Image (cartoon, rainbow, N blue to C red):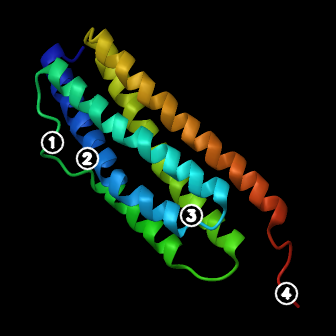
Amino acid sequence: MADKEVLKDLLEDEIKDLYSAEKQLTKAIPKMAKGSNDPALQNAFKGHLKETEAQAQRLEQIAEILEIKPGGKKCVGMEGCIKEGAEALSEDGDETVLDLGIIGAGSRVEHYEMAGYLTAISLAEQIGEKQVANLLKESLAEEQGAEDKLRKIATNLLGNAPKKAAA
Ligand SMILES: [Fe+2]
């Protein structure tokens, strides 16, 4: 069994990573909203921006409880996801297809965050930080909700997408 201090250090790293990810997203999500064509997709991103800002604050609260600093680490994985999002935004062509590409990028972001929150929750529970685990679970539920929303919008858009290449 890894000792508690080692697990707490790992949790600290995960919190810093998540904090960096959320902070990067508060800048990237408005661009995703602006670059989307479908109004439901724009609204989904706008709604998730507010959640993302609250998630960053929640991580600050968690850092206080754990008596650590949330900053000082760059989440390189999220930086990559955001770069892919920017690529999706720079494509041209059919608006619906473009939106589906943006949703693909957004979905990667949500899954990446979910992986981080799930890891942090396990660590927090293991070292008995119940309040921290509960706060992390609130954010996890929001990420899952955002992913569900994107999935539903994609299903709707696929109903309108071109079925075959133009002759
Ligand atoms: Fe988030």
Three-letter amino acid code at disc 2? Answer: Ser
User: Residue 122 location, x and y as percent?
Assistant: 37, 21
Q: Secondary structure at mark 4?
A: loop
Residue under pointer 2: 20
Q: Is the C-beta separation of discs 2 and 4 under 8 Å?
A: no
Q: What residue sits 39% from the left and 42% below the top? A: 52
Q: Residues within 10 Å of mark 4 (few under 14, many from 20)?
A: few
Image position of 167 (left or right of 87)? right
Residue 1 vs residue 138, the one in the foreground: 138
Q: Quadrant of residue 22?
A: top left
Q: Is mark 3 within 8 Å of ligand 1?
A: no
Report how far apart the C-alphas of labels 1 and 3 lie in the structure.
Answer: 28 Å
Q: Secondary structure at mark 3?
A: helix
Q: Is the C-beta separation of discs 1 and 2 under 8 Å?
A: yes
Q: Secondary structure at mark 1?
A: loop
Q: Is residue 160 above or below residue 17?
A: below
> Counting residues from the N terminus, which is met first, the one under dot 3 or under dot 4?
3
User: Residue 38 location, x and y as percent?
Assistant: 66, 62
User: Residue 83 location, x and y as percent?
Assistant: 39, 67
Q: Is the C-beta separation of discs 1 and 4 under 8 Å?
A: no
Report how far apart the C-alphas of labels 1 and 2 lie in the structure.
Answer: 7 Å
Q: Is the C-beta separation of discs 1 and 3 under 8 Å?
A: no
Report how far apart the C-alphas of labels 3 and 4 lie in the structure.
Answer: 22 Å
Residue under pointer 4: 166
Q: How many marks?
A: 4
User: Which mark is drawn over residue 102?
Assistant: 3
Report how far apart the C-alphas of labels 1 and 4 lie in the structure.
Answer: 50 Å
Residue under pointer 1: 71
